[in-house]
Amino acid sequence: MSVIKVIRERRSVREFLEKDVPGELVMEVLDAARWAPSSKNSQPWEFIVIRDQETKKKLAKLAKFGWFIADAPVVIAVVTDPRKSYAHVIDGSCAVQNLMLAAWELGLGTCWIGTMDRDKVKELLNIPKELHLLTVIPLGYPKKTPNPPSRKPLKEITYHEKYGEKIS
């Protein structure tokens, strides 16, 4: 699948099949994540692979809109280190995008979890206080493929030379 095709077809998945994700596929998406660009090649990310059902249930309760985390075969916590990069959130976000696109290309679904009690999740996962919990990403085989969301026309959001000068 071409990169452009994966970008256009990837969806956020909140319903997963009850099917295990092989370790090799998990490592493949993590390998894609580690190849993301980062400020000064700092690579400020680390990953925690979570398969334990009780831990996933606790994570689901700590994420306001993440009820479905408990149903994912795998959850990947993405941790960044502010001491390694002033842009650790941006760098980590690039890694997550790579992870999500690679997962889709491999037939796996993901969803960025943005709202959670980060302090309690860090405590649950034994993440040191000085590190930043960027997100947790549920990973599994999609039960169904969500419909594509609408997108604004490119001409509506693109300018020529200066803001407000519509591109033709």
Image: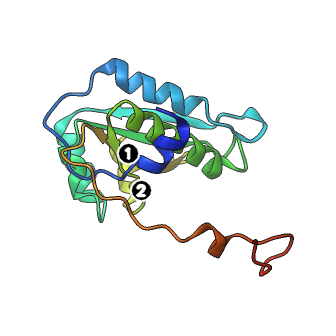
Q: Residues within 10 Å of mark 1 (few under 14, many from 20)?
A: many
Mark 2 sits on what residue? 119
Question: Residue 75: where, in percent of width, then height?
Answer: 32, 39
Residue to which mark 1 is pinned: 137
Sequence order check, earlier mark of 1 and 2: 2
Question: Residue 143 vs residue 136: left or right?
Answer: left
The three-letter amino acid code for the residue at tag 1 is: Ile
Label 1 element class: strand
Query: Is 35 placed above or below 130 here?
Result: above
Residue appearing at x 75%, y 77% in the figure: 166
Residue closer to the observer: 51 or 12: 12
Which of pointers 1 and 2 indicates the residue nearer the eye?
1
Q: Secondary structure at mark 2?
A: helix
Q: Which mark is residue 7?
A: none
Report whether residue 128 is seen: no
Give the amino acid at mark 2. Asp
Judged from this view, the residue extending furthest toward the bottom is 164
Q: CA distance from mark 1 to mark 2?
A: 17 Å
**Residue 55 position within the rendered picture, expressed as x and y whole percent measured from the top left:** 23, 41
The reply to whether callout 1 and callout 2 are in contact (CB within 8 Å) is no
Question: Residue at (41%, 47%) from the top-left corner?
Answer: 10
**Residue 158 in sight from this viewpoint:** yes
Q: Which residue is at a point 61% across and 29% down the rendered structure image? A: 35
Instruction: Check the image and report above or below for 94 versus 156.
Output: above
Residue farthest along the right direction in this orientation? 161
